[in-house]
Image (spheres, helix red, strand yellow):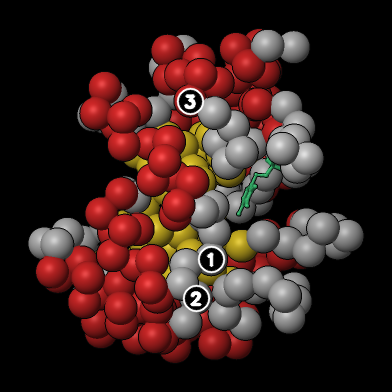
Amino acid sequence: MTVLENFNAVRAAVKKAAQYSKRNPEDITLVAVSKMHEQEEILELIKAGQRVFAENRVQEALRKFPPLKENYPDLKLHLIGSLQTNKVKDAVRLFDVIETVDRPELAKKLAEEMNKQNKNLPCFVQVNTGEEPQKGGCVPRETISLVNHCRNLGLNIIGLMCIPPVDDEPSPHFALLKKLAGQAGLKELSMGMSADYPLAVQQGATFIRIGTALFGARDYSK
Ligand SMILES: *Cc1c(COP(=O)(O)O)cnc(C)c1O
């Protein structure tokens, strides 16, 4: 399958899952996760009309995206990897959406940097729904207080994001994220990846983050 064929297949599956759950497919934004893929592959999707991409590393994104953004000013780039406070300046400069706000200190740094750069980027609070020690995200019971903390700092929090544990049934994690977003008064849900995005759509995802199903497997040996 080519990237273009994959793109069409993913969009068809999103549409089908949306219709099945009586949702408007246009309410679901496909975020193409281009980590570990090079500019030529990214360009194939751009030429097919895709405009929203995501990277998990600030350095890698800095290498790949400035030229692409120059040629395609309507590209939107999401940060989906954990953000260290010393990379906040570069992240705010390059990214359009930050999906991984997960602790008070990071929220504070982001708010300060956005003020400096005169930006107010949409952000998600990342929730570690499986409470996995190695994973980023706040624990579920701290979500509301973190969202409120971010709001007090002036951050534009639009929703919640989660990455369910690899070995778990994703459905309860998606349900928990949706419940927490409801309690926090947030509309957007970033959930669902290549293995489970139709299910995520059925459970209310408004942003799905898809890498492998579009670009094929990532080559970790390089
Ligand atoms: C890599 C990554 C994805 C995409 O995963 P695939 O299984 O390749 O679709 C989605 N979200 C996050 C946070 C990621 O790091």
For residue 168, which numbered disc appears in the image?
Answer: none
In the image: residue 148, left or right of residue 116: right
Decide: is 33 above or below 158: above
Q: Position of residue 93 (x, y in %)?
A: 25, 54
Q: Secondary structure at mark 2?
A: loop
Residues at marks 1 and 2, CA–CA distance in whole angstroms: 8 Å
The kind of residue on which mark 2 rests is Asp
Mark found first going from the N terminus, 1 or 3: 3
Identify which residue, 108 or 24, lies in the foreground: 108
Disc 3 crowd rating (10 Å Cα; few below 14, some 14-19, many 20+) is: some
In the image: residue 218, left or right of residue 12: right
The kind of residue on which mark 3 rests is Gln
Q: Position of residue 135 (x, y in %)?
A: 68, 72
- State which quadrant residue 13 falls in: top right
Can residue 3 be seen here? The reply is yes
Seen at 20% across and 61% down, the residue is 120
Q: Which residue is mark 3?
A: 39
Q: Mark 1 against mark 3, which lies toward the viewer?
A: 3
Q: Secondary structure at mark 1?
A: loop
Q: Residue furthest front?
A: 222
Q: Position of residue 175 (x, y in %)?
A: 68, 63
Q: Which residue is mark 2?
A: 102
In the image: residue 141, left or right of residue 196: left
The kind of residue on which mark 1 rests is Ser
